[in-house]
Amino acid sequence: MEKKWWQKSVVYQVYPRSFQDSDGDGIGDIPGITRRLPYLKELGVDVIWLSPVYESPNDDNGYDISNYRGIMKEFGTMEDFDRMLDRAHELGLKIVMDLVVNHTSDEHAWFAESRKSKDNPYRDYYIWRDGKDGKEPNNWGSCFGGSAWQYDETAGQYYLHLFSKKQPDLNWDNPKVRDEVFDMMDWWLKKGIDGFRMDVISLISKDQSFPDGKPESTGYTDFNVAANGARVHEYLQEMNRRVLSKYDLVTVGECSGVTLEEAKKYGNLEGTELSMCFQFEHMGVDSDPVTGKWTTKKLELPKLKEVLTRWEKGLEGIAWNSLFWDNHDQPRIVSRWGCDAPEYRERSAKMLAICLHMMKGTPYIYQGEEIGMTNYPWKDVSEFQDIDSVNNYKEIVKKGIMTPEDAFRALKAKSRDNARTPMQWDAGKNAGFSDGTPWMAVNPNYTAVNAEEALARKDSVFYTYQKLIALRKQMDVIVYGDYNLLLPEDENLWVYTRTLGEEKLLVVCNFSGKTVSFDVPEAFAAGEALIENYDTAGEGLSCIPPYGAYVLKA
Ligand code: GLC
């Protein structure tokens, strides 16, 4: 296998709106990101993935783009962007842009033209269909609730939108659309950016017969009707030939609905498509067959181990993997699968970090994860802003699928807004995020949970992440070693080994709030601890305290 720099890298995701405000309007911006680059350098990450910073009416916080070659006013100017890119490069940090090309905003100039008339040259940039028996062309649901089709009076037809009505889907079967997208990508790459994270890229090729999905096919049950379409690999190979292969990049596809077999193609090691993809099967282990993610169901550890082990083993030698717990669409991992009570917040955050970063694949850290930021203490449903949370709440309650109380509990646990509260920099006003009124409330625990405090204390979560990143750079076994699961049925412990030739690591993580005993395998009995999250003076390697974790080198 040819070794690539991004296999050794760690990526840090910035959600610009909530990272750092520099002009007091309460909204994070690009100069704010530039200011915080040294912090990311200190953490040790190699690559920064920026959630969208393009012009957008913000129906879905920038994932609805109205101009791919302009910067959102609230975030600054193109000059600010260029300065940030230069500064990042001076520090040895790479910048990856979010590429949102399954859909545009309905305020994009292409869509304004497209809806005008059937013979408009931009008509086929989007997906227009006549209704069926006075209803939508099929029963597909939008991920954000309601039908995926919207009737447009001017156009006299329905257009497809897998997300909000303000996010019409582009028609990738039209070669002109592909030309436009590839030109635009090239334009950014010529500026010097280092890669793309491709938003819902698995959805770009639609079955042109638009068959019905399952009878109750709605966003929160099954939007996978549109995933991994017949031509998706052809389009990505074309993108690779025409654009990506001309540069030395990292690319990661957000592949909603991806199966292991499909991921082998998206992230193949021959490099004909993308560097790797994000799969979401592990994010679904605590979801519900009917309501999807909207549930408070608890994690069953054997299930999570089974899923991630299958991905680790399945891609071995065939395709590259990506590793993540958190992003801007997920609740905070320490609240979800760790324990966010003050007693265990830090230890469980470190355990989760160790568990993920010792696996094979490129790890992604979402802003604030490195200091153990938690879910927000929501008091009322009116506090949510995210379109996904707000729309699905209404729909679930309206259809009587859940009571308002249960739906609120589900939102508290799973809403994307948990990830979108401002970054907690210090114990000062608004956690150091903004001098003005933040667009979204700061989590009140910022006085205890903040970056300044974490940097000042050597045993903070921050330094566990810093050490994990450094270890990855020093030890090939972490990057290239084979992964093997031990104790698959154990409900508390996740134990695995990594092996590269003579080098062997044992990773032991206690996902429970109990002390658990464990027989350290012979080969590791005299091993040296590379990293751990508790003081072994009181507890031993074979008596693991709540949320304890360690890595032994044989
Ligand atoms: C992706 C993004 C998400 C967005 C959606 C539509 O899943 O991560 O934030 O809402 O695509 O663009």
Image (cartoon, helix red, strand yellow):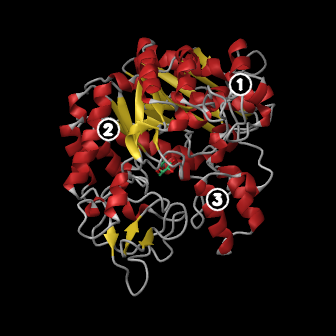
Q: Residue 133 at x, y = what percent? A: 39, 87
In three-dimensional space, the C-alpha distance between marks 1 and 3, rounded to whole angstroms, equals 28 Å
Q: Earlier in the sequence, mark 3 or mark 2?
A: 2
In three-dimensional space, the C-alpha distance between marks 3 and 2, rounded to whole angstroms, equals 37 Å
Q: Can residue 318 be seen in this view?
A: no
Q: Residue 13 at x, y = what percent? A: 51, 32
Name the amino acid, label 1: Gly
Dot 1 falls on a residue whose secondary structure is helix
Specify few, some or many for label 2: CA neighbours under 10 Å numbering under 14, 14-19, or 20 or more: many
- Indicate whether 139 appears above or below 434: below
Residue 390 bears which disc, if any? 3
Give the foreground label among 3 and 2. 3
Dot 3 falls on a residue whose secondary structure is helix
Quadrant in the rendering for residue 274? top left
Query: Which residue is labeled 2 in the image?
Result: 319
Residue 432 bears which disc, if any? 1
Specify few, some or many for label 1: CA neighbours under 10 Å numbering under 14, 14-19, or 20 or more: many
Q: Which of marks 1 and 2 is nearer the N terminus?
A: 2
